[in-house]
Amino acid sequence: MTDAHARNLDLQRQWYGEPLGDRFRRLLDRLGQSQAQLAGVLGLSAPMLSQLMSGQRAKISNPAVLSRLLQLEAMVGEPGWDALSRTEQERRIEAVRAARQTTLTVDQAKHPGAEPAAAADPVAIIQSLLRDLASASELEDAARLLAAHHPDLAEALRVLGAGRTQDARAYYAKLTARR
């Protein structure tokens, strides 16, 4: 492994909570698609997806691609996903491919004065917002600074901002169950 490759994988861990290859492989398995098909759904070229998966590139630079990735992960993580017919799964995948707006924006030209889209997956949106503001290491640093006086907030930053998505979902479920 080259220094650049190791650095890219470290950056992916900081920015996305884990290497993108791990996230993409889980999606490929759950969706039953090839890399080229997944690339098409995400709006990437197949070579770019391969470079992100292998760590040759570190960052998903297009926010719409990241939004579609988060939407797909949320979709296949739903408890009823496996019970859906293949036709319904493909319809939902196609809807993600066709989406022109992120989960956080609305096309203001088509919908003047509209509010942001409803949050289908609040954990994905929270993670996306936090990761847009700071890297995982910066969020960890902020959590360390807050820990002594605001331990609950520090834990939220650590888990929701810098942690793995599955851990963030469990944490969010625990928090919302308290209400």
Image (tube, helix red, strand yellow):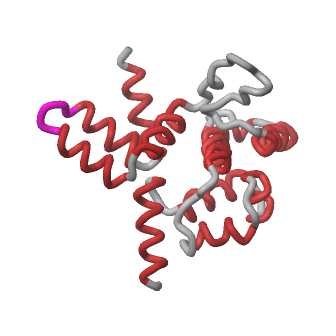
Determine the residue positioned at 17% across, 39% down. 147
Can you name the residue that lies furthest to the right here? Answer: 87
Determine the residue positioned at 42% across, 73% down. 7
* Image quadrant assignment for residue 173: top left
Which residues are the magenta region?
147-151
In the displayed structure, does residue 91 sit left or right of residue 67? Answer: right
Measuring from the top left, give residue 47's x and y in whole percent.
72, 71
In the displayed structure, does residue 154 sit left or right of residue 126? Answer: left
* Image quadrant assignment for residue 137: bottom left
Task: Classify 48 as above or below 14.
Answer: below
> Is 114 part of what is drawn in magenta?
no
Camera-nearest residue between 76 and 53: 53
Measuring from the top left, give residue 57's x and y in whole percent.
56, 70
Determine the residue positioned at 37% across, 25% down. 175
Determine the residue positioned at 65% across, 25% down. 117
Q: Main secondary structure of the magenta part?
A: loop
The quadrant the C terminus occupies is top left
Measuring from the top left, give residue 174's x and y in whole percent.
38, 28
> Is 148 part of what is drawn in magenta?
yes
> Across the whole image, how many numbered discs are drawn on residues?
0
Can you name the residue that lies furthest to the bottom here? Answer: 2
Can you name the residue that lies furthest to the left here? Answer: 148
In the displayed structure, does residue 45 sit left or right of residue 176? Answer: right
* Image quadrant assignment for residue 159: top left
